[in-house]
Image (cartoon, grey):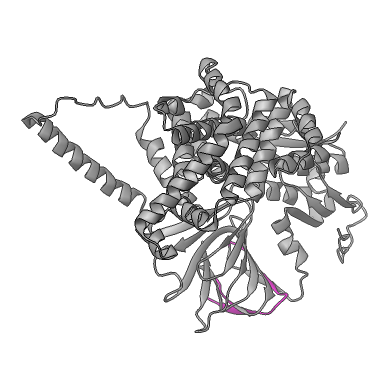
Amino acid sequence: MQPVPLYPDQPKADSMPLLLVNHQSEHMANVTDDELMLRQLFAQDARKGCALLFRRYYPNLVNHAVRFVYSKEVAEDLVAEVFTVFWQDRTFEQITTSYRAYLYKAVRHRAYNYLRWELRQSDSLELADEQSIPVSLQPDQMLHYSELHQKIESIIQSLPPQCQRAFLLSRIEGKKYAEIAQDLQISSSAVEKLLIRALGKLRQELKTDWFISLVFWGSIGSVSTWM
Amino acid sequence: MNSPLIKNIVFDFFDGKATAIQRKYIEAWLADEANQETYFQYLDEWEGQRPQFALDTDKAMASFEQVLLNTHPPAPQPKIVKHSPATGTIRWWGWSMAASVLLMSLLGGWLFRSQLLYKSYQTAYGQTTTFQLSDGTSVTLNANSMLRVPRFGFGNDTRDVFLKGEGAFNVTHKADNQRFVVRTDGNFQIEVLGTEFVVYARERGKRVFLNKGKVKLELPLGQQLYMKPGNVVTVANSGRYQLTQKAPARPYLAWKEHWFYFDNTTLTEVAEQIRERFGVQVVVTDTELAQRRIAGNFKAEKADDLLQILTELLNLTVVKTRNHIELRTSK
């Protein structure tokens, strides 16, 4: 941090003495309210508020959701759904936390339910559609979400290279089987097998210990619904 | 433990690098519900720093805008008709549905034609972002700014973009010497081949600072002007312009790192800059106070950061009302 070069013409004697300060402000946790503007906007025009909220948080929320569902398309849809419900159910009138905290919790909850549905192939997708998220999470549960996506990441990283490539091409770049087959110079059915293997690996590794601890509070979530 | 330290620990935890002891520590910290808010604030910041792929936010925004426009109050869910053989009425109903869907999409296409023709990059109040255009040019937008780039033909015949707000450009030079043109409101444009410069184009006027290379300005009154590195051209809304030969780069580039650069700047001007960057209306009614001057580099990511510094420096009181913030001398 360099001091500022002095301005050539000094201020006149009657004005304030020139103050030279280098100051880097620190984050004032819990004191500053960075969503104040948003809340004022919601009070005036909820539609504009929602639009601004979307623009502000959509990219980061998708970035977060994809860590769980590992599919760009699913992550995008999932976040858009959270915003749609937020608007249509007028959730913004009911929340007691910041918009940010609500959105992250809702996205995590949905992403987790989606993942569970995809890996178990169970028929409980209605659960995933439910917007109900626990009002307050236990600290341990909040941390568990991060650990879950780290675990998923390490499983993906440990896939055999060809399998990992096919998985990413399909789910992140949105390529079709035929395109992937061409890229990797294998047959379409081989691509399908690679993708099945990737999902199988996720299912097997997560089932052992990760889901058991998470499953039960998926059901807590549906009990303690929003008022 | 103070907050920067906690932030480091939480970030390490998100990265999967925290120790079990640190995890336990965060868990205890989260027991206070107020800290949960901070936790999500950190999470958002962390995600913002670790993008994993390019995302077409404009496209998603356009479809969400459809949702906002079309679905309020909540529309009743259409009932699924179970009996299968299509009777005359159902078929007619189906066709009319198809027709209205078509009509809606045509209408939507017309309403959102500028979204279809142009891709816009936008920054909210308090946010600066760097984008890379398809020709390799990088643009950093200051807060509350918008850059519009044609979706079709950009880089083929011309490279024309439209700017509202403030942006720093690093234009890639093309082998065929293709021009890059930045247009703004009020017949003002900057024409370059490949160079680095900063454009300010807001309500109060226009300003260009040239860091490297050479640019040609087309001024509102029809004049043309060539700039050399280190030059600053300020254009008033009246069309009058002023050229400064040797200006230091720092004051014009400081905002890229969220710095405010004040150099014998009046409080009125400071208030104006807060409004432009953060969208917060700051009022100074005391005329004597409004003329007080400050100098210094200040880093501020939120309006409150800067306001806090000002209050300490000038011994002020901040009065927050519904629509604006007033600065007064402390009694």
Q: Name, please, the residue furthest toward the left.
A: B88
Quadrant for residue B234, please give it: bottom right
In the shown orientation, is residue B278 left or right of residue A1? left
Examine the image and state in which quarter residue B140 appears.
bottom right
In the rendered view, tell whether residue B34 sits above or below residue B212.
above
Q: Is residue A27 among what the camera can see?
A: no
B219 magenta-colored: yes
Residue B217, image x and y in percent? 57, 75
Q: Residue at x 80, y 37 (%)?
A: B6
Name the residue rendered at 88%, 31% in the picture: B331
Residue B35 drawn at (x, y percent): 73, 28
Question: Is residue B105 toward the left or the right of residue B191 in the image?
Answer: left
Stretch in magenta: B216-237
B94 to the left or right of B153: left
Q: At 35% from the left edge and 35% from the top edge, which residue is drawn? A: B70
Q: Which residue is located at x 81 percent, y 41 percent?
A: B4
Task: Please check the rendered image and state whether residue B170 is part of the magenta-colored stretch, yes or no.
Answer: no
Task: Report if residue A81 is visible in the image.
Answer: yes
